[in-house]
Amino acid sequence: MKTVFTLSAIFLVLGLALIALLPVLGAVTLEQAMGIGIKFTMTVFILAIAAALIALLTKERTNTES
């Protein structure tokens, strides 16, 4: 569970770095970079929630079996 939150925090920082770095590199405009970064961050956020729920359900199931 702790790993899920650590990974989601790392990818959140990467998403924010995308917003900051893409316009500086001249790849896209600021508006496009914000769109890309927000989509990336929200995708990772949704995946982190799904992973956390799976971890909780798996943990709960193994606790009830034992």
Image (cartoon, rainbow, N blue to C red):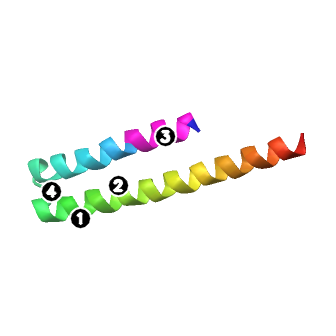
Tell us which disc is closer to us: 3 or 4: 3
Q: Pointers 3 and 1 in contact (CB under 8 A)?
A: no
Label 2 – label 4 distance at C-alpha: 19 Å
* Residue at image mark 1: 35
Name the residue nearer the viewer: 27 or 14: 14
Percent position of residue 16, x then y: 25, 47
* Residue segment shown in magenta: 2-10
Pointer 2 or 4: first along the chain: 4
Q: Upstream in the sequence, badge 3 or badge 2? A: 3
In screen coordinates, is 60 left or right of 36?
A: right
The amino acid on which the numbered mark 3 sits, given as a three-letter code, is: Phe
SS label for mark 1: helix
Q: Quadrant of residue 8?
A: top left
The location of residue 64, given as percent across then percent down, is: 85, 46
Mark 3 and mark 1: Cα distance apart in space = 23 Å
Where is mark 4, residue-wise?
Answer: 27
